[in-house]
Image (tube, rainbow, N blue to C red):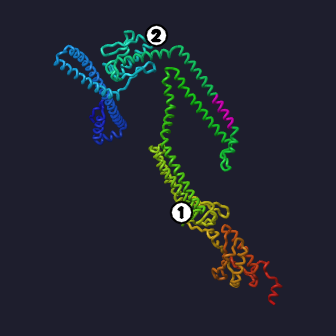
């Protein structure tokens, strides 16, 4: 491929694109060779990168050179206009002299006055144009400092002849430095000398320190003589100040002051260490007494050893921070003593004061938003107080709403409170600091995604808990059966229902399971205004026993059982006529559903005793036995004696 590779300094962005296009249009063989040849590929990519970079740099340098050239042209035009102004001033003086000589010649006088008027108008327009151009130059023209050591005396913004502002400032700084180093410097020898419209600052009638001419006075809206006088005074005062600052006596004073500051700093640090040491000793002795007050429902959160270690670490960290801060704040004081390091003082202080100033300014400007947040908070707080008072009155039955049960009051209040708090946060969110920043919004979106992905089951249980609340299938303390779990309800939350079984087992049932499964409430009809829960038990008796006798025996046995109500009266049902026996079901009312286990146990005991005493055999469970049919299957204590049998036979 015949492409001439120019030097990188002469390549442009277009050359790089041309190289890339021509190269990719080569034959497939060459392209594959290039692709699988790493060295050629790296050379090609490097060439593209360098051409693009050089194109960008050349474009930037071109823009800077255009600005510089434009500024130079404007300065040249201003100098030309100022020279024309000087020529017009000379012409004006000549015309004024001719006007005096032409007194009495009206035509000549009118002609000269017209020329003077034209020159005046031209000067006025030129002055306006100069001020406009100066205003434009001030936007872009940099100022170059004329300095002595670290002290800036003044700035130069304009050029003079072939010398730029930077060259003029550097030359003036060097000459002022020589004056400062001159052991026989005499401030009165620095004088101003006028040369046409220029004013030179001359030392001992030989050394020109700086010339004030051209646009210097126009830049500051002053005449050159006035500006030259200000430069002279600033140079004199700067040299005198620096010579006094670097005198031997002042150096000795500075060294003594530094030693004094170091001694005071050492004493302060020693006092701080002593104070924190005493604080640590006091914390060791007071940690146990403080721990006795640091309890939560008779629960100690920390042990004395842990609490003492935490406090000692905190005190040590505070001590180190205070010492570092004091040392840091002493550095600006030390640097301010010496002229060479005096400029560092402001920098060191700004490193601390600038963030503090920014923070205080942000806090001050945040006060209106803070007041808005407080107003919104207090409005919602008092609204919630009113709603809370209303629903608690509903719970106490002081306020009655048709179709609204009192046990709905607190759950409804909690729902309204959650909704109001959410609405309050929506109103407050725009007033939070940084709420409009992309980082804050990104974190909010991220948290929303996490909550939505990780709380699907929790939300299901919350919704189920709300539905259960308004369904009212049970209350706290009710004996219930949910699925295979039977026990007393001890807690209802938005997520789960806790049940305590008769074996003192705490079982947690998710609300979604409660909603999806059947629930048996044993306590609902055992309240004061209801008949009670029906306790029932089935047993089988042979056909040879009259059913009326069985009814009488069962009712007699159930009335002996504790917690059984005599009113309503117990009753018996025959549930089936089986092959060998009849199934009888005893039913009785009770107001103590939570004591079913004890009631059933006593009921079975009483049934056995009652039937055994009556000589009636209970045919459940089933059993088979080879026995004499004349014998009764009753306990020995209830078997009739032989004398009793003979009496019955006679």
Label drawn at residue 639? none
For the point 65% across and 33% down, which residue is it? 276
Residue that badge 1 annotates: 467
Task: Find numbered disc 2 in the image and state the secondary structure of the residue it sits on.
Answer: loop
Expressed as whole percent of the image width and height from the top left, the position of residue 350 reads: 49, 30
In this view, 627 is above or below 439: below
Expressed as whole percent of the image width and height from the top left, the position of residue 314 reads: 62, 37
273 in the magenta segment: yes
Give the left or right position of residue 453, taking residue 277 as reference: left
Residue 384 seen from this side:
yes
**Residue, far bottom:** 650
Segment tinted magenta in the rendering: 271-283
431 and 287: which is toward the camera: 431
Task: Find numbered disc 1 in the image and state the secondary structure of the residue it sits on.
Answer: helix
372 in the magenta segment: no
Using a 10 Å C-alpha cutoff, classify the residue at mark 2 as few (fewer than 14 neighbours), some (14 to 19) or many (20 or more): few
Using a 10 Å C-alpha cutoff, classify the residue at mark 1 as few (fewer than 14 neighbours), some (14 to 19) or many (20 or more): some
Expressed as whole percent of the image width and height from the top left, the position of residue 387 reads: 54, 57
């Amino acid at each position: 491929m015949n492409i001439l590779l120019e030097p990188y300094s002469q390549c442009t962005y277009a050359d790089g694109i041309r190289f890339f296009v021509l190269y990719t249009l080569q034959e497939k063989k060459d392209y594959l060779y290039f692709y699988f040849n790493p060295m050629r590929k790296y050379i090609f990519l490097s060439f593209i990168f360098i051409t693009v970079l050089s194109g960008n740099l050349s474009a930037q340098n071109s823009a800077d050179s255009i600005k510089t050239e434009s500024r130079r042209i404007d300065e040249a035009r201003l100098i030309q206009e100022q020279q024309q102004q000087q020529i017009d001033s000379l012409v004006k003086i000549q015309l004024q002299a001719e006007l005096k000589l032409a007194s009495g010649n009206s035509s000549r006088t009118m002609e000269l006055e017209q020329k003077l008027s034209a020159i005046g108008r031209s000067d006025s327009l030129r002055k306006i144009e100069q001020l406009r151009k100066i205003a434009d130059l001030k936007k872009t023209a940099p100022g170059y400092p004329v300095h002595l050591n670290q002290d800036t005396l003044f700035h130069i913004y304009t050029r003079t002849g072939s010398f730029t502002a930077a060259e003029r400032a550097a030359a003036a700084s060097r000459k002022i430095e020589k004056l400062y180093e001159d052991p026989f410097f005499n401030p009165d020898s620095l004088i101003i000398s006028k040369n046409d419209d220029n004013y030179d600052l001359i030392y001992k009638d030989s050394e020109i320190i700086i010339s004030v001419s051209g646009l210097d006075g126009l830049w500051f809206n002053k005449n050159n003589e006035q500006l030259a006088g200000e430069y002279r005074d600033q140079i004199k005062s700067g040299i005198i100040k620096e010579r006094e600052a670097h005198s031997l006596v002042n150096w000795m004073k500075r060294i003594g002051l530094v030693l004094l500051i170091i001694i005071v700093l050492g004493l302060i640090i020693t006092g701080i260490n002593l104070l924190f040491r005493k604080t640590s000793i006091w914390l060791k002795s007071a940690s146990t007494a403080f721990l006795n007050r640091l309890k939560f429902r008779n629960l100690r959160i920390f042990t004395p050893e842990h609490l003492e270690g935490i406090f000692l670490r905190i005190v040590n960290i505070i001590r180190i921070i205070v010492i570092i801060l004091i040392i840091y704040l002493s550095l600006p004081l030390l640097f301010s003593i010496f002229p060479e390091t005096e400029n560092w003082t402001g920098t060191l202080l700004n490193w601390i004061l600038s963030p503090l100033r920014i923070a205080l300014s942000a806090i001050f400007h945040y006060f209106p938003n803070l007041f808005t947040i407080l107003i919104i908070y207090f409005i919602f707080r008092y609204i919630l107080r009113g709603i809370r008072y209303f629903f608690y009155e509903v719970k106490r039955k002081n306020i009655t709403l048709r179709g609204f049960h009192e046990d709905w009051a607190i759950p409804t209040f909690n729902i309204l409170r959650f909704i109001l708090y959410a609405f309050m946060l929506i109103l407050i969110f725009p007033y939070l600091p940084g709420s409009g920043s992309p980082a804050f919004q990104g974190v909010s979106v991220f948290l929303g995604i996490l909550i939505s992905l990780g709380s699907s089951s929790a939300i299901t249980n919350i919704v189920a808990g709300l539905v259960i609340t308004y369904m009212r299938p049970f209350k706290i303390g009710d004996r219930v059966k949910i699925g295979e779990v039977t026990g007393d309800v001890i807690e209802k939350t938005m997520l789960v229902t806790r049940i305590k079984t008769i074996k003192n087992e705490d079982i947690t049932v998710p609300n979604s399971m409660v909603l999806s499964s059947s629930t048996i409430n044993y306590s609902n009809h055992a309240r004061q205004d209801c008949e009670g829960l029906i306790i029932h038990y089935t047993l089988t008796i042979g056909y040879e026993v009259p059913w009326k006798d069985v009814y009488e025996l069962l009712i007699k046995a159930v009335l002996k059982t504790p917690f059984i109500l005599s009113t309503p009266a117990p009753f018996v049902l025959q549930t089936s006529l089986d092959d060998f026996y009849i199934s009888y079901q005893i039913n009785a009312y009770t107001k103590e559903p939570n004591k079913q286990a004890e009631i059933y146990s006593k009921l079975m005991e009483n049934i056995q005793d009652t039937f055994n005493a009556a000589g009636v055999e209970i045919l459940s469970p089933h059993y088979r036995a080879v026995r004499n049919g004349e014998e009764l299957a009753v306990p020995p204590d209830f078997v009739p004696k032989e004398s009793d049998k003979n009496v019955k036979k006679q």
